[in-house]
Amino acid sequence: MQRLACKYSVIQFLPYPETGEFANVGVLLVCEKTGLLDFRLETKRTSRYTSFFQNLDAALYRYATKNLAEEMKRIRNLTAHGFKGDLIKAFDSLTHPRETILRFGAPRIVLTDNPTQELDSLFEHYVRHGFAKDANYETELERKVKNCLSELKLAAPFKNKKVGNELFAVQFPLVQTINDRAAKAIKPFYLGQQTPNAIYDHADRWIAKLKRLRDMDLMPERVLFAVKGPQGPDSPDFRKRDFAFRDVRDELARFAQIALERDGNGTQAIRDFAIH
């Protein structure tokens, strides 16, 4: 699959230049290859900004974002049917340093096979802080797995430990050591992120780790991933998220056993793995 180079800039809200404090409120992205120039701007969840910036009038935020959105829409529409070379000029014009309360961060490059999905992922990451929510979900999943294991009263309990050597090591939250060797490792793994791209990104980091452990002959004797996938089948993008989840789950299965956590299911598979 072809990887496309895109430029993006994070839009920053800086109501009080005197302090230098700012909050991320949007993302602008351009992909010259596909002719895409588009943006995402936070216009709904304004309480976050009025809480962070004391004495801020919410009307000021709404007014500033409304004006910027109109400007970006106008330029997006102008370039939609123009030459692709105009896209970069338009992007550079929008992101040119400006002394206003809404500014653009330094442009960055990202490679992706789906620019629109990448824009959604960047917005979820930089503005909605999706990584924090995902980390909380994974922490809760880890807590459930630990409680399940504690009930088994194992002679060799699972503990947080690095697996590897002085050249390369990976931290697993649950490792069973027998005769000074990592016999089993369990990784509670949340794969219900808000976009397909975010699911791929999170899984790819661990797939790369597992591959390196295997190639360097450092893998534990057995590895189990306790996985929880996307929820909410009625959501409009569930089918795409579920496809990405199933895709990376199959990749993970090349390196580890999979215990699928769905509405409480999967607990028995974790117990069987720990005992046998």
Image (cartoon, rainbow, N blue to C red):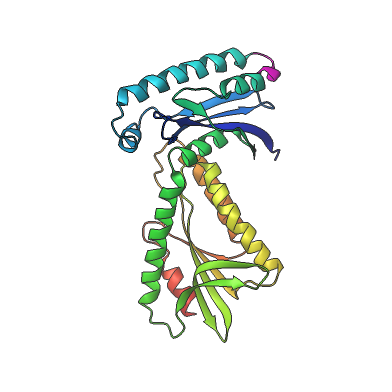
Query: Is 193 placed left or right of 217 in the picture?
Result: left
Please report the residue visible at 43 percent of the width from the left and 36 percent of the height from the top.
Answer: 21
Q: Residue at x 38, y 59 (%)?
A: 140
Image spot of residue 91 (x, y percent): 61, 23
Is residue 26 depicted above or below 207 in this figure?
above
- Residue 73: image x %, image y %? 51, 17
Q: Where is residue 7 in the image (x, y as percent from the top left)?
A: 63, 32
Res. 135 image quadrant: bottom left
Viewer-proximal residue among 89 and 57: 57
Considering only vertical position in the picture, is 144 above or below 199?
A: below
**Is most of the magenta stretch helix, strand or loop?**
helix
Which residue is painted at 46% across and 22% down in the image?
Answer: 100
Task: Give the residues in magenta.
Answer: 82-86
Picture quadrant of residue 170? bottom right
Residue 256 position within the rendered picture, expressed as x and y whole percent measured from the top left? 58, 65
Say whether residue 43 is left or right of residue 217.
left
Residue 78 lies within the magenta run: no
Whether residue 254 appears in this view of the structure is no
Residue 88 versus residue 165 in the image, above or below: above
| Rendered view: 169 above or below 120 | below
The quadrant in which residue 57 appears is: top left
Is residue 84 inside the magenta stretch? Answer: yes
Q: What number of labels is visible?
A: 0
Residue at the far front: name it. Answer: 18
In this orientation, does residue 75 appear?
A: yes
Q: Nearer the viewer, residue 173 or 275?
A: 173
Q: Quadrant of the N terminus?
A: top right
